[in-house]
Image: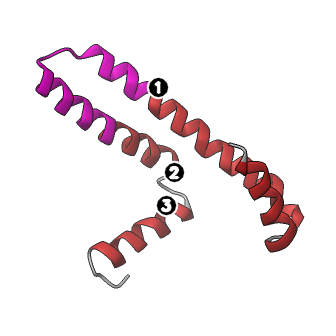
Amino acid sequence: MVEIPWLFHNLFQEVFPRKFLGQFVFFFFGLVIVALVSCTISCFLCSLLHFGLWSTLIVNACISFVMPNILFFAVYGRSLLFKESIAQFKRVLLKKRV
């Protein structure tokens, strides 16, 4: 957390124009809020399930993987950044040209 103000300072002092600082901070905190909501929902859903040791671990792992991805897709699915990430995923992992 200590590095974040230093990162903002370096990015907007040396790399980007200072007028984009507010937009970047707003986007960054938006990502953090969605991640916190995702973690809270995953933790709540996982706390509701009580099976055997291994079955609970497997179900909780599935919930912890699927639920945040669904939430991120619902929130950011139509954004340009998300579409570019999917295209890069296809190029790198699936060896497809997009």
- Per the rendering, the mark at residue 40 is 1
Describe the element under mark 1 as helix, strand or loop: helix
Distance from the alpha carbon under mark 2 to that under mark 1: 18 Å
**Residue type for callout 3:** Phe
User: In the rendered image, which residue does mark 2 sit on?
Assistant: 76
Task: Please determine whether, in this image, residue 39 is positioned above or below residue 6.
Answer: above
Instruction: Specify the principal SS of the magenta part.
Output: helix
| Residue sitting nearer the eye, 79 or 2 | 2
Q: Which residues are magenta?
A: 40-65
Residue, far bottom: 97
User: In the rendered image, which residue does mark 3 sit on?
Assistant: 82
Query: Pointer 2: residues within 10 angstroms few (<14), some, or many (20+)?
Result: some
Relative placement, left or right, of 83 versus 16 is left
Residue shown at 60% from the left, 41% from the top: 32
Comes first in the chain, label 2 or label 3 = 2
**Residue type for callout 2:** Tyr
Task: Please determine whether, in this image, residue 40 is positioned above or below residue 77.
Answer: above
Query: Where in the figure is residue 47, as x and y percent of width and height?
Result: 32, 16
Comes first in the chain, label 1 or label 3 = 1
